[in-house]
Image (cartoon, helix red, strand yellow):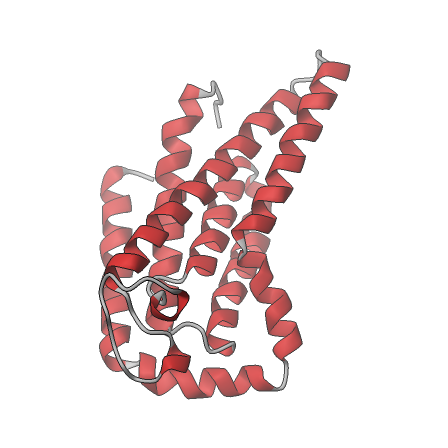
Amino acid sequence: MSGKQILFLSLIGFMLSIISIFTLDYQLASPALSLGLGNKAFWNLVTDLGDSKYMGMLLVATWTSAFIYQKITPENPFWPDLRKKSLLVLAAVAGTGIFVIIVKTIVGRARPYMGDIGFSPFTFGSEFASWPSGHTTSAFAFAVAASMAFPILRWPLLALATLTGFSRMALGVHYLGDVIMGATVGTVGAVLIYNWLRPKLGLKS
């Protein structure tokens, strides 16, 4: 993805998010929540797919396993590649996650369950941490970075990331605009971090 494409994607995602905030978010909040009321256990399970701590545990376990197998079979190039790629994906998830935490604090958008009270910038606390969606950001960062490392996983991972984003609306903790911006940050951030780190780690793809 070229610099112009990354910039274009960033602008489109931001614009769609802003448009959603002013035109769709409050109208869609109740219908989305109603879909989740009867299947809350399912949506809680889905939303955990976007929890960065579980991603971190998976990626650290993958890195550790690859490191051990690399020592056992040093002639096999798969294990050092897997170790480096798991590190790349972890960096994408962590980097975008830190960025979103900072943005959330600055913006201070109230979550749907707080009612239609808008924004309270520089307000600490989860109640005013709606925009962008952190779970959606992590889900898309993981999906995009992992699919760049292993292209065969692209569509299943992107489908799961999209479902994770919707789960945040179904659980009443995010608006559509939050999810759109989270997906944008996760995607763009993952591409930037992956492309920056890949040559430094000596990976060709």
Query: Where residue 189 sits in the image (x, y, percent)?
Result: 36, 44
Among the 4 quarters of the image, the one containing residue 66: top right
Query: Where residue 204 sits in the image (x, y, percent)?
Result: 48, 23
Viewer-side residue, 73 vs 61 = 61
- Is 197 above or below relative to 118? above
- Is 132 above or below relative to 85? below
In the picture as drawn, the residue positioned furthest to the top comes out as 75
114 left or right of 9 in image: right
Q: Residue at x 56, y 65 (%)?
A: 47
Q: Residue at x 22, y 78 (%)?
A: 22
Among the 4 quarters of the image, the one containing residue 128: bottom left
Q: Residue at x 71, y 29 (%)?
A: 65
Query: Where residue 127 sits in the image (x, y, percent)?
Result: 38, 71
Quadrant of the image containing the N terminus: top left
Instruction: Kindly tell me whether residue 73 is visible in this rendering.
Output: no
In the picture as drawn, the residue positioned furthest to the front comes out as 124
